[in-house]
Image: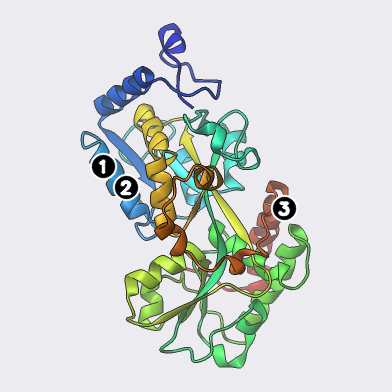
Amino acid sequence: MMMKRAVLAASAGALLASTALVSAETLADIEAAAKQEGQLTTIALPHDWCGYGAVIDGFKAKYPEITVNELNPDAGSADEVEAIKANKDNKGPQAPDVIDVGLAFGPQAKADGLTMPYKVSTWDEIPDNIKDADGHWYGDYYGVMSFLVNKDLVANPPADWADLAKPEYKGQVALAGDPRASNQAILAVLAAGMSKGAAAGEAAGKAGLEVFAEVNKAGNFVPVIGKSGTLAQGATPIVVMWDYNALAARDTLAGNPPVDVVVPKTGVLAGVYVQAISAYAPHPNAAKLWMEYLYSDEGQSLWLKGYCHPARFNAMVKAGKISPELLDALPPAASYEAAYFPTLEEVDANKKAVVDGWDSVVGANVQ
């Protein structure tokens, strides 16, 4: 992702096109330019999502000269892309430098001319199937869909997607986002559809809508964006969310209330999120430096500490760079054995089916 010195000399705006490691001198140039910019604007990064609180703190500690301006931590992937579009001509604090979005949103942002190509120095250790060959977007971490359950209010936690429609869960089931805009919620519908035996993509999206239509018809669905706070308050005792969010919530709640994190028996879906730099980033060097930090050993380990499997996970394990303590803190490996990694085409087809059909099939206005 880095710019080579020869390219820098030829043009200050040129972008690195190779995957070669960046020299210390070139990295120093980017660091110096980023410190001159003095700010990085992020968006949609809740501190309890994937350990982002520690990641942001780590970046601040390493680069105290750079202020991190955090926009709308609870925004969804679609909101992030819209923020770039809305601020094309705005170099102020409302214009995001970087985005962290669901897999389907990366290629679309590239197609719309909203991303800046950049390849980090650890580019070769990011699997080819989760990165754009030109460096416009690249996978950062993944998890599986799960149920976060308030044990004080739910005596028998649901074990699978079909259970969510049972009478005992009346007024208790929520998604962790609006399925018309949130990647997390959109993929929850895909997972539910796959549990019915539907093929990943449009078929599973439509089948998943039927699952949630049944949950809503039973009076079990709560049209509120579920979070650890709403779960603790009893407003949404069962929240469908990524396992890393659920495990982080478990730690944050610290037994008040006690919770279960359940990986469903079927429809075990793995979801990859991707990073990208805005083509209109007010602080492009700070954005590149942020990416270098995220894909460094330190940044990747912090994501793992936040219960996310980072993009460089396999390479780091092979190189002995991950501590046994971090590996032991993850759920049992057996929970992930049946995990399915959908292709980009399947994710796109599902997204269209869910976004287009939620209102007519399920009819619950999630807010």
Q: Earlier in the sequence, mark 2 or mark 3?
A: 2
Q: Quadrant of residue 210?
A: bottom right
Give how far across and how far down residue 9 sits, in percent: 41, 8
Q: Residue at x 47, y 73 (%)?
A: 224
Residue wearing tag 3: 346
- Residue on which disc 2 sits: 56
Task: Work out whether mark 3 precedes mark 1 in sequence or the reverse, and give the earlier one.
Answer: 1
Q: Nearer the viewer, mark 2 or mark 3?
A: 2
User: Residue 62 appears at what percent x and percent y?
Assistant: 26, 38
Residue density around tag 1, few if under 14, some if 14–19, many if 20 or more, within 10 Å? some
Residue 109 percent location from the top left of the image: 57, 39
Q: Is residue 305 above or below residue 91?
A: below
Identify residue type, mark 2: Ile
Instruction: Give the residue at x 39% y 69%.
Output: 249
Three-letter code, disc 3: Glu
Count up the numbered dots: 3
Taking 19 as reference, is 7 above or below it? Answer: above
- Measuring 70% from the left and 49% from the top, which residue is drawn there? 343
Q: Give the label on residue 60, or none.
A: 1
Most distant residue in the top direction:
10
Give residue 133's quadrant in the image. top right
Label 1: which secondary element: helix
Query: Would you call the spot at circle 2 few (<14 residues within 10 Å), some (14-19), or many (20 or more)?
Result: many
> Does residue 140 appear in this view?
no
Q: Amino acid at mark 1?
A: Lys
Q: By what rule are the colours in the image chosen?
A: rainbow
Q: Which mark is residue 222?
A: none
In terms of secondary structure, where does tag 2 sit? helix
> Mark 2 and mark 1 in contact (Cβ < 8 Å)?
yes
